[in-house]
C-alpha cells in the first residue's frame, strides 16, 4: 500500500509531530484510555455494581462449574487449582506460551486445554455459555490488577505478528485496525466514540450482544465491520492480535467482567 | 434454567424503605426477529414479575417484548416485620423462577 510504510521510528516521529500541532482535545487522546472512560455514567454504574452487572450471572455459573466434576478423570477445576482465590492475577497475564503446543494460548483455550488434558473431557465450544462462564469467573479474580503480559522471549514473534496484523489493511473497506483505533480514537464512528482498543475488561457483557462475549468475538466484529472475512475461532491470528493488544495495554487496570455498549 | 441474583440489605430498621435488586438470566426474545432461516423466532419473554413480603404482594411488574435480555429490576419497599421476600418471574414457555431471601427487621 502506498504511503503506509511499516510503523517505524520515522512514522512514529511524524505522528508525534502531528499530535503536537493538533488541538488540545486530540492531544489528550495520546493518553491511554479504557473504553470504560468513554461510557456514560449509567453504564459505568452498571459495571461497578456487582448486583447490576449482568456479567455476574455468568460469574455465578462459573462458580458452580468450578467445583463440578467432568470428564473421565472425574476431576473439577477446584480439585487441581483449589480455591478460586488462587487464580488472582492469572487472567492479567494471558495469552501465555503453552510449551506443549509451541504457541501461545488465550484464557479460553487454556481452560479447554485443562478440560481435554487434565479432566479428559470434551472441549467446550467456542463462545459457549460454560466456557464464557468459567473465563468470566477466573477473570473476575483479577479485577483491579494491572495487565501484566509475561516477559517471555518465546512470545516476541507472536506479538510482532499481531503488531503487523494490527497495521495491515484488509477487507473491502481496506482498513487496518490502527486507522480507527490509533489514528482516529476518540472521534466518532456513527454515534459511537471510537475506543483505543485496549482489552481491559474481557470477557465483556456487551449491550449490543445482550450477552457475554470474548475478545475473539469482539475482534470478529471489527473484521466484519471492515468487511473482511473473519478467521475461524481457532485461528492463530486472534491470539497474535490479543497478545499485541495486551502488551499495548500493559499496566492498565483489568475490569473483567466489564460492561460495554 | 432461570438463575437469578437477588440483593437485599442484611438488616433494616422498622419503617425504613430498603432497596431490592433482582437480576435474572433470560433471553427476552421479542417474537419480531427472524432467525437464520428467515422464519420469525417465537416470542419468549418474562411476562410477569411479582414480589411478596411475608405473603403480601408489595411489587409487581408486567414486562413487554421491548425489555432487554437479562432484565434488572430494582425497587423499594418499607420494612415492617422480619421474614422473607419471595420474588417470582413467570413467562412464555412455562418459564417460572422463584427466589426467596430472608430479611431481618430491627426495632
Image: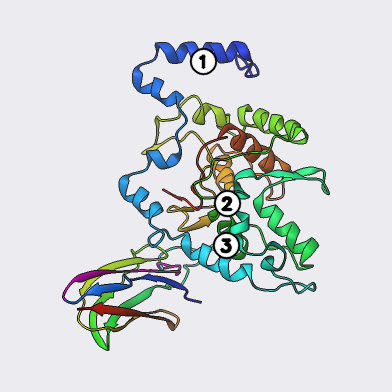
Residue B25: x and y, percent? 45, 69
- Does residue A215 sit above or below A58 in this rendering? above
Residue pushed farthest bottom?
Answer: B55
Task: Report, in whole angstroms, how far the alpha carbon at label 1 lies from the one at label 2.
Answer: 31 Å
Label 2 sits on a secondary structure element that is loop
Q: Counting other residues with Cα less than 10 Å from the Cα at mark 3, is it few (<14), some (14-19), or many (20 or more)?
A: many
Splitting the image into 4 quarters, where does residue A83 fall? bottom right
Label 1 and label 3: CA atoms lie apart by 41 Å
Using residue A41 as the reference point, say whether residue A18 is left or right of it.
right
Residue B35 drawn in magenta: no
User: Magenta segment: does it hold B21?
Assistant: yes
Secondary structure of residue under mark 1: helix
Report the mark closest to the observer, 1 or 3. 3
Counting from the top left corner in percent of width and height, residue A92 is at 60, 45
Q: Which residue is mark 3?
A: A133
Q: Which residue is mark 2?
A: A214
Instruction: Report the chain holding disc 3.
Output: A
Circle 1 residue: A15
Q: Toward the viewer: A98 or B65? A: A98
User: x and y percent of residue A240 in the render?
Assistant: 69, 38
Which residue range is magenta in the image?
B15-30
Q: Which residue is at a point 55% across and 11% down the rendered structure image?
A: A13
Amino acid at each position: 500500500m502506498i504511503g503506509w510504510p511499516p510503523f517505524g521510528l520515522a512514522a512514529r516521529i511524524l505522528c508525534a509531530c502531528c499530535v503536537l500541532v493538533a488541538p488540545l482535545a486530540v492531544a489528550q487522546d495520546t493518553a491511554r484510555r479504557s473504553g470504560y472512560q468513554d461510557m456514560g455514567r449509567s453504564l459505568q454504574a452498571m459495571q461497578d455494581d456487582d448486583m447490576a452487572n449482568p456479567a455476574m450471572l455468568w460469574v455465578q455459573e462459573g462458580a458452580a462449574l468450578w467445583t463440578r466434576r467432568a470428564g473421565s478423570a472425574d476431576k473439577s477445576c477446584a480439585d487441581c487449582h483449589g480455591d478460586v482465590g488462587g487464580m488472582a492475577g492469572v487472567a492479567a497475564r494471558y495469552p501465555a506460551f503453552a510449551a506443549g503446543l509451541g504457541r501461545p494460548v488465550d484464557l479460553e483455550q487454556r481452560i479447554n486445554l485443562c478440560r481435554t488434558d487434565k479432566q479428559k473431557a470434551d472441549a467446550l465450544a467456542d463462545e459457549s455459555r460454560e466456557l464464557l462462564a468459567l473465563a468470566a469467573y477466573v477473570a473476575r479474580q483479577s479485577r483491579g490488577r494491572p495487565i501484566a503480559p509475561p516477559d517471555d522471549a518465546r512470545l516476541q514473534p507472536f506479538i510482532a505478528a499481531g503488531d503487523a496484523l494490527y497495521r495491515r489493511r484488509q477487507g473491502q473497506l481496506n482498513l487496518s485496525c490502527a486507522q480507527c483505533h490509533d489514528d482516529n480514537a476518540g472521534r466518532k464512528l456513527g454515534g459511537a466514540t471510537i475506543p483505543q482498543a485496549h482489552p481491559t475488561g474481557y470477557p465483556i457483557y456487551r449491550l449490543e450482544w445482550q450477552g457475554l462475549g470474548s475478545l475473539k468475538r469482539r475482534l470478529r466484529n471489527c473484521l466484519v465491520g471492515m468487511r473482511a472475512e473473519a478467521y475461524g475461532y481457532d485461528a492463530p491470528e486472534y491470539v497474535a492480535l490479543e497478545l499485541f493488544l495486551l502488551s499495548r495495554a500493559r499496566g492498565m487496570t483489568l475490569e473483567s467482567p466489564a460492561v460495554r455498549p | 434454567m432461570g438463575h437469578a441474583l437477588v440483593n437485599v440489605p442484611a438488616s433494616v430498621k422498622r419503617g425504613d424503605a430498603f432497596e431490592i435488586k433482582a437480576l435474572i438470566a433470560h433471553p427476552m426474545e421479542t417474537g419480531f426477529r427472524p432467525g437464520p432461516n428467515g422464519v420469525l423466532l417465537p416470542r419468549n419473554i418474562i411476562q410477569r414479575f411479582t414480589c411478596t413480603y411475608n405473603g403480601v404482594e408489595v411489587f409487581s411488574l408486567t414486562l413487554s417484548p421491548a425489555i432487554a435480555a437479562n432484565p434488572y429490576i430494582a425497587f423499594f419497599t418499607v420494612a415492617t416485620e422480619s421474614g422473607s421476600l419471595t420474588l417470582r418471574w413467570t413467562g412464555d414457555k412455562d418459564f417460572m423462577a422463584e427466589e426467596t431471601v430472608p430479611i431481618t427487621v430491627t426495632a
